[in-house]
């Protein structure tokens, strides 16, 4: 009586292992990685903050960089943020 029970347990264990392996081999989701997508925005906002421009408005993507309007000595000024290069410069 123990042999058929042991055989059933071993068969179930083998099937569970095969299922777990096939589940792990599935392709990753086709959804974009939010962290990768949002990282340039986060880097740009952090760069604004680190340069003393925590109070900004009109933050927007423009081509491969971002722009925002900040108060620079009381004057509204556009700054251009390049998150890939880690730079922030005043616009025109």
Image: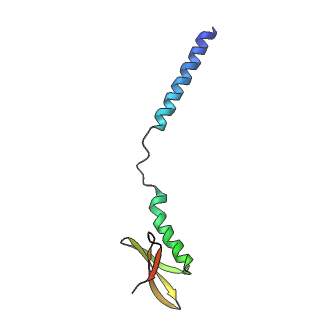
Residue pushed farthest left? 63
Residue shown at 51% from the left, 72% from the top: 45
Residue pushed farthest bottom? 74
Residue pushed farthest top? 1
Quarter of the rendering containing residue 53: bottom right
Give the total number of marks visible in the rendering. Answer: 0
What colour scheme does the image use? rainbow
Name the spot of residue 36 as percent of width and height, x first.
46, 59
Indicate whether 47 appears above or below 92: above
Residue shown at 54% from the left, 19% from the top: 11
Residue shown at 56% from the left, 76% from the top: 50
Indicate whether 17 appears above or below 9: below
Name the spot of residue 33 as percent of width and height, x first.
45, 55
Name the spot of residue 87 as percent of width and height, x first.
46, 76
Where's the C terminus, which quadrant?
bottom left
Where's the N terminus, which quadrant?
top right
Q: Is residue 22 left or right of residue 62?
A: right
Name the spot of residue 23 as percent of width and height, x first.
48, 36
Residue pushed farthest front? 85
Q: Is residue 63 left or right of residue 12?
A: left
């Amino acid at each position: 009586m123990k042999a058929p029970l042991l055989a059933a347990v071993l068969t179930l264990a083998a099937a569970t292992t095969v299922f777990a392996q096939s589940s792990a081999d599935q392709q990753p989701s086709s959804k974009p990685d939010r962290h990768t997508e949002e990282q340039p925005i986060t880097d740009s906002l952090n760069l604004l903050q680190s340069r003393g421009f925590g109070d900004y408005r009109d933050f927007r993507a423009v081509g491969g960089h971002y722009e925002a309007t900040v108060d620079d000595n009381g004057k509204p000024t556009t700054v251009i943020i390049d998150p890939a290069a880690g730079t922030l410069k005043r616009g025109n």
